[in-house]
Amino acid sequence: MAKIIKPLTDSQVKQAKPQDKPYKLADGGRLYLYVSKLGTKSWRINYVRPIGKKRATITLGLYPDVSLAQAREQRKQIRTMLAEGVDPQQQKIDDEREQELLSNNTFAAIADDYMSRKRNVSPATITNNNRQLKRLNKHIGDMIITDIKPIDVLNACRTAEAQGYYETAIKMRTIAGQVFRYGVQTARCERDVTQDLIGALQAPVTTHHPTITDPKELGVLLNAIDSYEGSCALVNCVMRYGMTSTLMLVLGPLRLVRLKDGLDYH
């Protein structure tokens, strides 16, 4: 005659104390509470593997993190899996691997991987890209990249747009697109969803400053540059790049202008 096991009560589980040796408190259906010499309590269940028919034990969790009711629910799920020919221990391993894979497929994780490979890029570009990624990660960093929709990226970019940072919003979309394309290349997503956002963000208003063509105004500019006491590097930059187009535009008229007619530069 089979031994009848009386189910445990919450009080028995709670009041179980450590002894000289580890011991078990059975709840029936091969589920039991294992109490270690140090008093640690864990739920365990014995079963026979569907393939190979070998005995095995699986730990369901520690008490009180896993209550008696929760342990019984897990026992029910395990019995269902066994009836379907599924090894619960192998299933647990597979689930943990899948979870680990998913954790490495977040937008933030892929962005970090992408940026770590950008070695032939200037420090200024790296800093700027990281700044935009930091903004994006606040909204989509923890999301699995395959779960991210165009609207998710758009909403993230519009947080900058709402502050009047239109160029920043566009930069955010640009770097997000680079991350998605890297995700496609590394088989972690199928497409770059930011392609659907072209034209969705407000373009910054560009203010064009007119070229100086009047000789008198050019003289004023040259005097201002000559008397500037700030960074020499800035002056050199202006003279090298900024003045080139101006001088080329006024070079023709200037050769016909006498100094006394307008160009007053010392």
Image: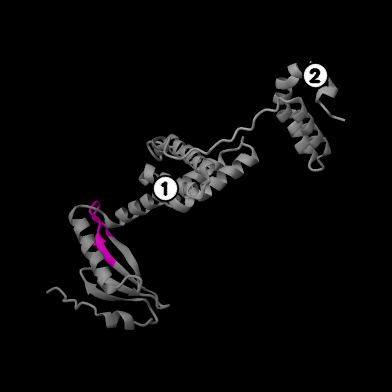
Residue nearest the observer in this picture, 176 or 206 = 206
Q: Amino acid at mark 1?
A: Asn
Q: Is residue 226 magenta?
A: no
The part of the image, by quadrant, that contains residue 253 is top right
* Relative image position of residue 218 (x, y in whole percent): 76, 29
Residue nearest the observer in this picture, 70 or 41 = 70
Q: Which mark is in front, 2 or 1?
A: 2
Side of 263 relative to 14 (left or right): right
In the displayed orientation, state which residue is furthest to the right.
Answer: 266
Instruction: Count neighbours of disc 1 (C-alpha within 10 A) and say few if under 14, some if 14 to 19, many if 20 or more.
Output: some
Residue nearest the observer in this picture, 253 or 168 = 253
Q: Residue at x 40, y 78 (%)?
A: 39
Query: What residue range appears in magenta?
Result: 45-55
In the displayed orientation, state which residue is furthest to the left.
Answer: 1
Q: Amino acid at mark 2?
A: Val
Residue nearest the observer in this picture, 44 or 238 = 238
Instruction: Count neighbours of disc 2 (C-alpha within 10 A) and say few if under 14, some if 14 to 19, many if 20 or more.
Output: few
* Disc with the residue nearer the chain's start (2 vs 1): 1
Residue picked out by circle 1: 155
Q: Residue at x 81, y 34 (%)?
A: 223
Q: Residue at x 32, y 56 (%)?
A: 92
The part of the image, by quadrant, that contains residue 212 is top right
Side of 112 relative to 143 (left or right): right
* Relative image position of residue 246 (x, y in whole percent): 71, 25
The part of the image, by quadrant, that contains residue 236 is top right
* Relative image position of residue 45 (x, y in whole percent): 27, 66
Residue picked out by circle 2: 257
Give above or below for 43 relative to 120: below
Side of 56 relative to 162 (left or right): left
In the displayed orientation, state which residue is furthest to the front.
Answer: 261
- In the picture, the quarter occupied by the C terminus is top right
